[in-house]
Image (tube, rainbow, N blue to C red):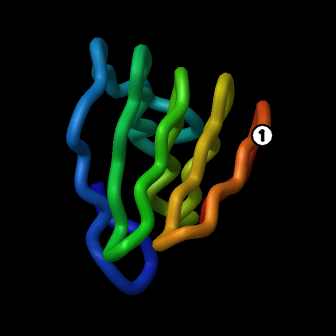
Amino acid sequence: LFSHGSRLDLFHAYLSRVLKSGGEEVQILEGNVHVRQDTVDIYCDTATYYPAESRLELSGNVRILRNQETMTAETVTYL
């Protein structure tokens, strides 16, 4: 996975699939998802990546960790 500026690394997901949406390939990660960008660790139930927009839609038990900071939510749009 790539995002605007730096690489987004996938560490874990139970399922990874690619769907076509409006001519664009969209990657969907499901189940105990863990990705990292630089020093930010992201955990959620489902992550949907839209490469043309460098947009990651996160849903379900979202936790974003950076150093000593933690953010939790049910849904997040990560650019």
Residue farthest to the front? Answer: 68
Residue farthest to the bottom? Answer: 5
**Is 78 rendered above or below residue 35?**
below
Q: Nearer the viewer, residue 46 or 61?
A: 61
Quadrant in which the C terminus appears: bottom right
Q: Amino acid at mark 1?
A: Ala
Occupied quadrant, residue 19: top left
On the image, the x and y values in percent for residue 66 come to 50, 69
Occupied quadrant, residue 51: bottom left
Q: Residue at x 54, y 69 (%)?
A: 68
Does residue 75 appear left or right of residue 63 in this picture?
right
Mark 1 element type? strand
Q: Nearer the viewer, residue 1 or 22?
A: 1
Q: Nearer the viewer, residue 19 or 40?
A: 40
Quadrant in which the N terminus appears: bottom left
Q: Residue at x 36, y 38 (%)?
A: 34
Q: Residue at x 60, y 43 (%)?
A: 63
